[in-house]
């Protein structure tokens, strides 16, 4: 019988390695006002709940002395999105970096591309990453895949990620919720362990 309802990892009997708080690094991906429906152009379908979950992730990491790296998206001053110095490029309230926390500025969805993110992670001596942020199908997805290919063990906090409604190119709209769920299912198939909240780690 075909193994329906199983991940690639389960079918191949390859147990994914999941980090613990005491041996992981937290990456907050694009936790910025551009995803806030009140002011941004990329409104996340679950902004209120996901931003609250992000805050819990950050507070938990700080409480447990987990290294935190804030990955921020920036574009040139003429861009419609993430304009350098613009209001929507700023961190979401309560998610602002502290002075002892690292910040990486990225210009593409993949947070490792043309940045020093890998160097900052490797400086901690840790190989396990906890990833959360926006948007699930772009920056989170591409960063998780890149991390996997670089040899990191990745855990994604589902409730601390979010997405928006987008067209599929065939005159249909894929809702943010469905896009979020499908992307996480894809990542959980092989690239990462997906959990609901930070306390599940």
Image (cartoon, helix red, strand yellow):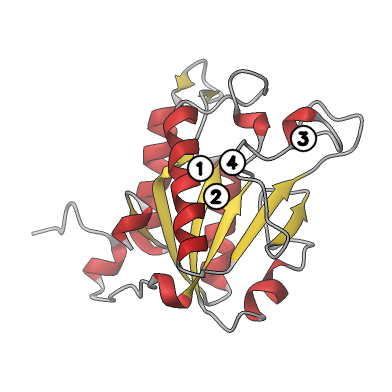
Residue drawn where x is 83% and y is 33% of the image: 83
Spatial separation of the CA atoms under disc 2 and disc 1: 5 Å
| Pointer 3 with pointer 4, Cβ within 8 A | no
Mark 2 or mark 4: whose residue is earlier in sequence: 4
- From this view, report whether residue 133 is shown above or below residue 49: below
Find residue 162 and report its horizontal and vertical position in percent: 48, 36
Find residue 86 and report its horizontal and vertical position in percent: 82, 31
Mark 3 or mark 2: whose residue is earlier in sequence: 3
Q: Is residue 130 left or right of residue 185?
A: right
| Residue matched to label 4 | 94
Spatial separation of the CA atoms under disc 4 and disc 1: 20 Å
| Pointer 2 with pointer 1, Cβ within 8 A | yes
| Residue matched to label 2 | 140
Mark 4 or mark 1: whose residue is earlier in sequence: 4
| Residue matched to label 3 | 82
Query: Which of 72/62 is in front?
Result: 62
Query: Which of 120/76 is in front?
Result: 120
Mark 1 or mark 3: whose residue is earlier in sequence: 3
Q: Which quadrant holds residue 8? A: bottom left
| Residue matched to label 1 | 136
Q: Is mark 3 on a helix, strand or loop?
A: loop
Q: Give neighbour class at mark 3: few <14, some 14-19, many 20+ (Cα, 10 Å).
A: many
């Amino acid at each position: 019988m075909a193994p329906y309802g199983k991940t690639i990892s389960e079918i191949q009997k390859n147990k994914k390695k999941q980090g613990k708080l005491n041996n992981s690094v937290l990456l907050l991906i694009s936790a910025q006002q551009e995803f806030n429906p009140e002011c941004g152009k990329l409104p996340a379908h679950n902004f209120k709940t996901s931003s609250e979950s992000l805050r819990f992730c950050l507070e938990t990491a700080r409480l447990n002395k987990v290294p935190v790296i804030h990955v921020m998206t920036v574009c040139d001053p003429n861009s419609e999105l993430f304009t350098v110095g613009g209001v929507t490029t700023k961190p979401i309230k309560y998610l602002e970096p502290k002075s002892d926390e690292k910040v990486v500025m990225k210009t593409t969805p993949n947070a490792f591309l043309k940045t020093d993110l890998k160097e900052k992670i490797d400086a901690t001596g840790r190989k396990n990453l906890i990833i959360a942020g926006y948007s699930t199908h772009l920056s989170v997805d591409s960063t998780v895949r890149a991390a996997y290919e670089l040899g990191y063990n990745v855990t994604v906090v589902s409730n601390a990620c979010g997405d928006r409604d987008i067209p599929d190119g065939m005159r249909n709209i894929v809702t943010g919720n469905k896009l979020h769920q499908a992307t996480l299912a894809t990542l959980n198939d092989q690239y990462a362990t997906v959990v609901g909240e930070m306390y599940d780690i």
